[in-house]
Image (cartoon, grey):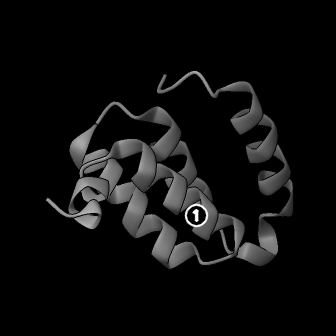
């Protein structure tokens, strides 16, 4: 199995990729990754929350980005 195939099934890797894309303002791409996380782990509330943030246009999400960073620092424990 290639590293790429393993990452496709690795929820944490998919979530982190989506979060990185969201931080870069690539919301459409980020949504695809969060959807993949949710397909594998439907109870991944962090991914669902981030997907919701990705639906907000980047020019309107400055406050949300600050809030997301704080939340991510607090929730490094795993999925809630």
Q: Position of residue 59 (x, y in %)?
A: 80, 77
Total marks placed: 1
Instruction: Locate residue 54 relative to residue 33 in the image: left or right.
Output: right
Could you tell me which secondary element the residue under label 1 belongs to? Answer: helix
Above/below status of 6 relative to 72: below
Instruction: Locate residue 67 relative to residue 75 in the image: left or right.
Output: right
Q: Position of residue 52 (x, y in %)?
A: 54, 54
Quadrant containing the N terminus is bottom left
Q: Position of residue 17 (x, y in %)?
A: 51, 61
Taking depth in this image into account, of 59 and 12 the one nearest to the observer is 12
Q: Residues within 10 Å of mark 1 (few under 14, many from 20)?
A: many
| Res. 53 image quadrant | bottom right
Above/below status of 71 relative to 59: above
The residue drawn where x is 50% and y is 68% is 30
Instruction: Locate residue 68 relative to residue 79 in the image: left or right.
Output: right
Query: Which residue lies under the disc numbered 1?
Result: 54
| Res. 4 image quadrant | bottom left
The residue drawn where x is 40% and y is 35% is 44
Taking depth in this image into account, of 59 and 10 the one nearest to the observer is 10
Above/below status of 77 relative to 46: above
Q: Position of residue 27 (x, y in %)?
A: 57, 73
Q: Residue furthest left?
A: 1
The residue drawn where x is 67% and y is 74% is 57
The residue drawn where x is 34% and y is 30% is 43
Taking depth in this image into account, of 57 and 80 the one nearest to the observer is 80
């Amino acid at each position: 199995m290639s590293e790429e195939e393993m990452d496709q099934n690795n929820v944490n890797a998919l979530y982190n990729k989506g979060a990185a894309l969201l931080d870069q303002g690539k919301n459409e791409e980020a949504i695809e990754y969060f959807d993949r996380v949710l397909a594998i782990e439907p109870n991944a509330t962090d991914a669902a929350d981030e997907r919701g943030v990705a639906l907000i246009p980047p020019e309107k999400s400055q406050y949300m980005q600050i809030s997301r960073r704080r939340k991510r620092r607090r929730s490094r424990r795993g999925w809630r």
